Image (cartoon, rainbow, N blue to C red):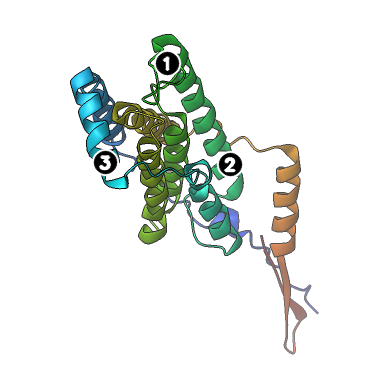
Amino acid sequence: MNQGMYAQQDSSKNEPQPIQKNTRGSYFDVTWAPVGLSLLSVSLMTDSSKYGLQTLIRQPFNGYETNLDDYIQYAPIALMYTADLFHVPAKNNAWNQTKFLAMSELGTSAIVQLLKYSLKVQRPNNGSYNSYPSGHTSQAFVASQVLFNEYRETNKFLACSGFLFSISTGTLRIVNNRHWVPDVLLGAGIAMLVTNTVYYFEPLKNWTPRLFNRRNSETKKNKTQLGFIPTWNDDYIGGYLTLNF
């Protein structure tokens, strides 16, 4: 009687691995728009432009003010994590989304605060001298740009929806007479530039805390499949052992 035959298969080793191609394009592709917004902002910093645009935008609202912009600036972040809960396909998992969001927020905030207290432009309501650029607008555009970068390939409607909130936030900052038009444009430009830079270079993308590594390891173990196919005839008894992981 012959010995049983056993075959072990490791799908992760036997299958050919696809060649990873660089499909991110050039850095210019993701920076020309925010740089353009920033340059436009600088060109509108003259008093005649600032006051003219402020009057043009605020006049139809007849002094209307609201604090809605304090809240809707975070709406794109809520949309992203809600999409994660419903397993909407995204570019990155929730951990990398959070990591890139945090990097974008910190980088944008550092630049915005530095400019605010260095340039010392007074707010249009004769308030404090920290108007330029707009912090609310920069926060809102970081959130909407992250949402866009995550879902642009899988769900274009969801990806673009965040800009409804960021544009509204910037508009309300002007309507509330808290910021000039150039403030809003530069805030948006800086946010988009920093966020797109983070997503282009993807720093620390492969870094994952030990806790997450442990969870991923347990998930992989749960997906391991072991099977045995018995076979026999007059000459031998044996089978095929299959192991997929």
Q: Residue furthest front?
A: 62
Q: Position of residue 214 (x, y in %)?
A: 76, 46
Query: Which tag, 3 or 2, sits closer to the chain's start?
Result: 3
Q: Which residue is mark 3?
A: 59
**Circle 3 residues within 10 Å: few <14, some 14–19, many ≥20:** few
Identify the residue shown where x is 35% and y is 27%.
183
Identify the residue shown where x is 75% and y is 89%.
234
Q: Position of residue 118 (x, y in %)?
A: 43, 10
Query: Which residue is more in the foreground, 184 or 173?
Result: 173
Identify the residue shown where x is 39% and y is 17%.
122
Q: Position of residue 61 (x, y in %)?
A: 32, 46
Q: Is residue 85 above or below residue 235?
A: above
The type of residue carrying mark 1 is: Leu
Q: Which residue is mark 1?
A: 115
**Circle 2 residues within 10 Å: few <14, some 14–19, many ≥20:** some
Query: Which residue is more in the foreground, 70 or 156?
Result: 70
Q: Which residue is mark 2?
A: 98
